[in-house]
Amino acid sequence: MARYHIETYGCTSNRGETQQIEQALREGGHHSADGPESADVAILNTCTVLEKTERNMLARAKELDAETPADLVVTGCMALAQGEEFQDADIDAEVLHWDDVPQYVLNGECPTITPDTETVLNGVVGILPIARGCMSDCSYCITKQATGKIESPSVEVNVEKARALVHAGAKEIRITGQDTGVYGWDTNQGTSRLPELLDRICSDIDGDFRIRVGMANPKGLHGVREELARVFAEHDELYNFIHAPVQSGSDDVLADMRRQHAVSEYLEVVETLDEHLDYWTLSTDFIVGFPTEEPADHEQSMALLRETRPEKINVTRFSKRPGTDAADMKGLGGQTKKDRSKEMSEAKMELMAEAYEEMIGRTSSVLLVEDGTDESLVGYDEAYRQVVIADAEDRGLEIGDTVDVEITSHNTVYAFGEPIERAQVAD
């Protein structure tokens, strides 16, 4: 597991975000390092309240970039408002939203789910782990040593857990697991029961709620892609969102990673969802700098990124995990990994900016699920794209409300929405 070092600057809100990041990292089996020099990843949660503060953040980021032997992640207010400043200062860092930091630190590994797979209600967000373990044997992943093969409770058990969350006040149910795409493989002869579970939750439970499906590897999705796409198209309760980590655009590298899927299977999943859904979000992950990744393999990954144009992308430099087969491979040089990561990260930001730019003028139904800064509230639209309503509390809006908005602008990784009722009054 990864050793992390995290530093926080700014207000109470930033400190709260850090607590959530650390909780997610600990739940994923990661632990705090003694300092940046002994960490696998350093995380800088930034503030941008004053010009002097900005200079201090850039200076500290430079120091951490030099002190940390592996990755540097910059998040927080300055990262979101002025992320380009870090690149302009030649700081080698991943600039991420708070919510994306834990996934990045996972380094392509499956998340670790608690042994009892119990539900959690956090405000209006209900966490529903539908199974524990996975069916993969990735050469770089240490998580499988802790979790083992898939163990799937029945559909009926998970439906009842979802019902209990809704009755307890959940407006959003986040379905999680090491690999939600292989839910039921152990009880259904190697075929996923995920479409059946989603259909049952949407059909059998009364209430006003939405469902987000967590990480699902392409192999598990591929066999049920048509059925899954039809379920998404049929039920408005489902966010039109899939997180399918491809990890590489090269079949040779995927074989060395022991990823089980081929690039063609990933493409077929994407194409099927494109056929059934007009507006949806593809989220995926790439690991750059795997030990056997040749320049041509990296170019294949870049080509796949541009071909499928995901709206949400996690880019991670390969780092060795003790006890894994990939740890025994001769690694690529650090500069090679940095250069490839930089190239892909720049392409990622361009694609994300284009996706959010295309949202401007769109009318979306946004479920508000968390506090933002000042009087703002943060929510997600039908495709699980993040939307901020700047003065939501002044308008009388609350967490748990669903509001129709017009998308007016964006900040590359999230959009800003104007409630339609107010826009009509202004006219």
Image (cartoon, helix red, strand yellow):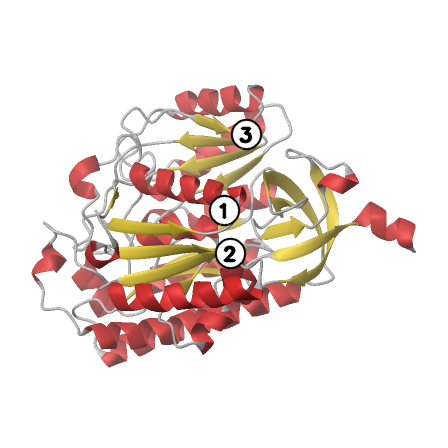
Position of residue 128 measured from the top left corner of the image (x, y, whole percent): 43, 30
Number of marks in picture: 3
Q: Is 344 on the left or on the right of 227, as rendered?
A: left
Q: Please report the residue visible at 25 percent of the width from the left and 72 percent of the height from the top.
A: 337
Q: Earlier in the sequence, mark 3 or mark 2?
A: 2
Q: Earlier in the sequence, mark 3 or mark 1?
A: 1
Q: Please report the residue visible at 64 percent of the width from the left and 33 percent of the height from the top.
A: 400
Position of residue 81 measured from the top left corner of the image (x, y, whole percent): 57, 62
Instruction: Find disc 3 in the rendering and name its residue.
Output: 123
Task: Determine which of the numbered discs, if any, sits on residue 47 in the image.
Answer: 2
Position of residue 269 measured from the top left corner of the image (x, y, whole percent): 42, 56
Task: Determine which of the numbered discs, if any, sits on residue 82 in the image.
Answer: none
Q: Please report the residue visible at 52 percent of the width from the left and 21 percent of the height from the top.
A: 163
Q: Amino acid at mark 2?
A: Cys
Quadrant position of residue 368: top right
- SS at mark 3 in the image: loop
- Residue furthest left as drawn: 328
Q: Please report the residue visible at 32 percent of the width from the left and 33 percent of the height from the top.
A: 184
Instruction: Find disc 1 in the rendering and name its residue.
Output: 14
Position of residue 173 measured from the top left corner of the image (x, y, whole percent): 51, 33
Residue 41 visible in the shown view: yes
- SS at mark 2 in the image: loop
- SS at mark 1 in the image: helix
**Residue placed most toward the observer, 173 or 39:** 39
Q: Earlier in the sequence, mark 1 or mark 2?
A: 1
Q: Amino acid at mark 3?
A: Gly
> Is mark 1 in CB contact (under 8 Å) with mark 2?
yes
Quadrant position of residue 204: top right
Measured along the vertical axis of the image, is residue 364 above or below residue 409?
above
Q: Nearer the viewer, mark 3 or mark 1?
A: 1
